[in-house]
Amino acid sequence: MDSKTQARYRARAKVIKAMAHPSRLLIIDQLIEGEQCVFELTEMIGADKSTVSKHLSVLREAGIVQDEKRGLQVYYSLRVPCITNFFSCVEAVLKSNTEAQGAIG
């Protein structure tokens, strides 16, 4: 595999790895509905501000979310709303797995 192809797979893995945490998936789900400030996300997740900020930082570094500071608050939104397509695919896999297990049992 050439270096350009390797770099592309590493970049894909970085995005997928950034989403690989339940709280980050919840954050993305909330941002599908529209932008949220850190305070709102902290209340929703039920974690402290520093933990939520760390999750948001991971998502931002992977290019999944973007932020905008307004006064004392920082608002987050999805950079690329097509992430919902990925979530739909994951749900299809989960449904398929459930159906397969039902056929076995």
Image: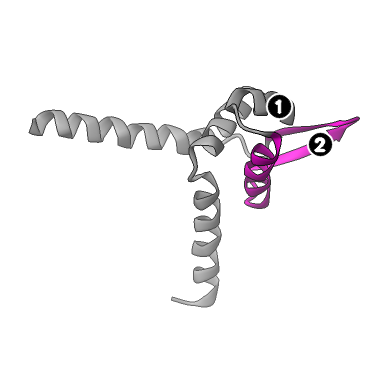
Task: Give amino acid for label 1.
Answer: Glu
Q: Which residues, given as a range, are shown in magenta?
A: 49-77
Q: Which residue is mark 2?
A: 68
The residue depicted at 88 percent of the width and 31 percent of the height is 72
Position of residue 91 measured from the top left corner of the image (x, y, whole percent): 37, 32
Disc 1 packing (10 Å; few <14; some 14–19; many ≥20): some
Kind of element beneath mark 1: loop
Q: Work out whether mark 2 precedes mark 1 in sequence or the reverse, and give the earlier one.
A: 1
Residue 69 horizontal side relative to residue 58, left or right: right
Towards the viewer: 67 or 72:
72
Furthest toward the bottom, the residue is 2
The answer to whether residue 83 is visible is: no
When asked about the image quadrant of residue 73, the answer is top right
| 52 inside magenta stretch | yes
Position of residue 19 measured from the top left corner of the image (x, y, whole percent): 52, 44
Residue 31 horizontal side relative to residue 88, left or right: right
The residue depicted at 59 percent of the width and 32 percent of the height is 27
When asked about the image quadrant of residue 103, the answer is top left
Q: Gap between marks 2 and 1, in whole Å? A: 10 Å
When asked about the image quadrant of residue 98, the answer is top left
The answer to whether residue 31 is visible is: yes
The disc label shown at residue 93, or none = none
| 43 inside magenta stretch | no
Residues tagged 2 and 1 counted as in contact (Cβ below 8 A): yes
* The N terminus lies in quadrant: bottom left
Q: Which residue is mark 1?
A: 35
